[in-house]
Amino acid sequence: MENNPLSLVQLNSLVRRSIEACLPDTYWVQAETSDVRANSSGHCYLEFVQKDPAGNTLIAKARGIIWAGTFARLRAYFERETGQAFVSGIKVLVKVSVGFHELYGYSLTVVDIDPTYTLGDLARKRKEILNRLDKEGILTLNKELEIPEAAQRIAVISSPTAAGYGDFCNQLNSNAFGFVFYPRLFPAVMQGDKVEISIISALNRIYEEADNWDAVVIIRGGGATSDLSGFDTYDLAANCAQFPLPIITGIGHERDDTVIDMVAHTRVKTPTAAAEFLVNHLRQTAERLDNFIQYIYQEMPQRIVRERERLDGWLARIPSKIQLRIQQESFIQERFARRIGTALQTRFQSEKHRQEICLQRMQTALRVRMQTEKHRIELYSERIKAASPDILLKRGYSMTLKNGKAVTDASRLRPGDTVETRLAKGSFKSKVI
């Protein structure tokens, strides 16, 4: 073998023949599209990938090709059935033949596609978005808003060049009832990969002046059904669901609702139908006003007559009612007067008895207090008698006076001072030497 090595092209040819021999049939394959591109010849080149559900990392990849004739037929069929453009990032079920080229290597050639598989995946994604909105408690917020009775100031989100926008304005302005509407366009991209960010930007501009508008209309009209995927995103749906003004959608498709159709206040099929809805809403308001006017003209005179008769009846009943009320009040006053007399007599007796009790208590308290004070005076008298100088003198004590004042300190006497000494019986004078 080392003496007869294979060239690369020989090895690749061997691989090609082996694959053709082992995999001669076509096979249905589930995969996700990636790097989808069509060249000027109409051929479509792409990659099929499979990702790990846990980590979203690639676990398989294969180069794919759809020849021009097959691609034109399959793309139209796929987009018509699914409403989804054949682009990167969608899950598909394709029928492929396995091939190997000496120069280009391993590839899968697509010969058929099953749109129902993609439809199921799209439906699953829509369901996941709706479940998330419901879990967050915002799914039906816009539906719970009330469209104003006179909804005439309409903020319109649409492409300025869309025929649907012109149809919408014509339908509003040429309505058979002569109603006046004030629509204003907030331009947005309504197809392609910028639908989501463009409509959200328009909603933000409307929100800044929300007090100037009664409702928001999102209309598309025309365009391929395959361009509807931009209306099936979580961020756009969340913005619409939480918007403070009622949203009316008329995206121009009849078969399947997009996610924003499901969260909007009202969904209609076309821009013209959106205009008809607004005209009809205003017509219902006008009819209610006409009914009120008819009621005023027809019912009010009869109501005035009935009320006048009722008033006359009340006026006739007033004298007797007044007389009866006077009698009732007189009886009540007499009863109160009797109750007041009885209550005063009872209160007088109670107060008299209470005064007698208080007087007895005061007399008793005074006698006790007088006895107490008399006893205390006697004690004070005994103490005063015991402290009298005469008593002390009788016990043999004497008292020395100088100039009529008692001498208690000998150091204050001076030679030659005359002092008086008092005894129990008599007194005598002395001179200090």
Image: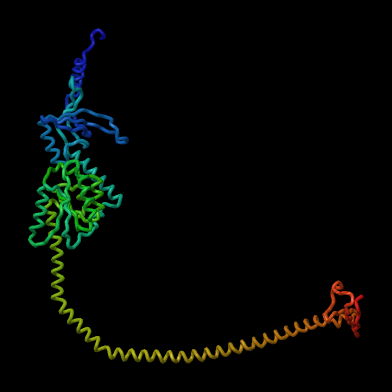
Of 70 and 283, the residue lying toward us: 283
Rendered position, 89 above or below 353: above
Residue 306 pos. (x, y %): 19, 81
Picture quarter containing residue 38? top left
Furthest residue in direction top, as rendered: 3
Residue 183 pos. (x, y %): 14, 55
Quadrant showing the C terminus:
bottom right
Of 169 and 133, the residue lying toward us: 169
Rendered position, 203 above or below 365: above
Residue 110 seen: no
- Is residue 77 shown left or right of residue 61? left
Residue 256 pos. (x, y %): 17, 47
Picture quarter containing residue 77? top left
Rendered position, 10 above or below 51: above
Residue drawn at the location 18% of the way across and 79% of the way down: 303
Residue 360 seen: yes
Residue 325 pos. (x, y %): 33, 89
